[in-house]
Amino acid sequence: MRCLLILNPGSQGGKSKAKFERIFAFLHKNRVKFDYRLTKTLDDAYTFSLAGNEKGYEVILAVGGDGTINRVISGFYDFQGKRNSNSKLAVIHTGTSPDFCKSYNLPLEIDQALNAVLEGKTVQIPMAKITYLSEYDEKLDGQPLSLAHEKLQTSYFACCANIGIGASVARGANSGIRDYLGDYAGTLVCLIKALISYHPVNFSVRIDGKQEVLEKAYNIFVGKTTYIASGLKVKNELALNDPRLYGLIIKKLGLVNWVKVLQKLYSGNEFANNSTMSLLYVQQMEIFGSSANNEIEFDGDPRGFLPCKIEPALDALEVICPQKGLHRF
């Protein structure tokens, strides 16, 4: 086995560095041939992953939080949504909120994750493709994405994308507040603060080819997994091999019902669609440009701007996973 480790020494406020020697010692003991790269920025994780795929490493092991994992995943894909190698993804989560690992029951303990690498058993996990702008362009307000735009970006995600309040919440949660209050409480505080100051807008969308306007929208979740952020959960019916995405739309919130919406999101229970909360399943969702609340967040980090297009990747990703532990929540 030939393995590439992509390690983020800054994850979990820099605490993850202490775990690296433990990982190296395990691999040396078990005679695993490996190289490693240390990231200075999250974008380094994408660059290293892309190079690792091109060089034909059997396993690319992401060591970091969901942001690191997300960039490593994007390095497995070309711009069309197809895998660019036969490399396998492995994960050792050293970040704050292990939403990807919890959604697929991937090991959170270092030794268990490394033993899974030695076993080499894998599962095919479908990913989502998101195309968006790296910079805001007012000329596209109210317009769909132009695939010829000079600022076009293509990325991939495993968990969930958020349009609306999501970027503000993620920026607050990533500011260091969770180091003091913990993951759950820190994110909840940021979510409540964002709700108080947020001004909902009308988003023009195209869902599986049908165009409509979502009035007074607070957030559009488009995702694959149950766990989406620091205790927030979206109960959905997607099976592991289902290429579709879910869309959860939150709109027309008032002071009376936003508490109920939070309770439903944190409980992860099923709910009946209503005028405030509605869940649907889609093959493709486009959100048009907007002059307000136009940032896009996915897998825990603000990443770009509307308009965007979200759809399934053409190929699933082969992920190291102990078969006895596999269960999609």
Image (tube, rainbow, N blue to C red):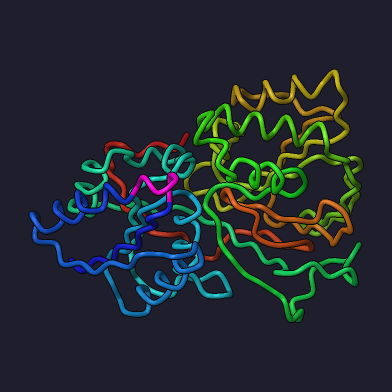
Query: Is residue 261 left or right of 62 when viewed as pictured?
Result: right
Residue 141 in picture, x, y percent from top left? 90, 64
The quadrant the N terminus occupies is bottom left
In percent of the image, x 40 and y 69: which residue is there? 49
Q: Nearer the viewer, residue 112 or 165?
A: 165
Is 117 magenta? The answer is no
Query: Is residue 118 left or right of 15 when viewed as pictured?
Result: left
Q: Nearer the viewer, residue 283 or 13?
A: 13
- Position of 307 relative to 147 (above/below): above
- Position of 85 relative to 329 (above/below): below
Assign the magenta stretch its main secondary structure: helix
First to last magenta residue range: 11-16
Is 14 magenta? The answer is yes
Q: Nearer the viewer, residue 135 or 118?
A: 135
Specify the quadrant of the image occupied by residue 57: bottom left
- Position of 60 relative to 191 (above/below): below
In percent of the image, x 78 and y 61: which residue is there? 306
Residue 50 in picture, x, y percent from top left? 43, 74
Query: Is residue 48 left or right of 205 when viewed as pictured?
Result: left
In percent of the image, x 58 and y 48: which residue is there? 300
Query: Is residue 39 left or right of 276 when viewed as pictured?
Result: left
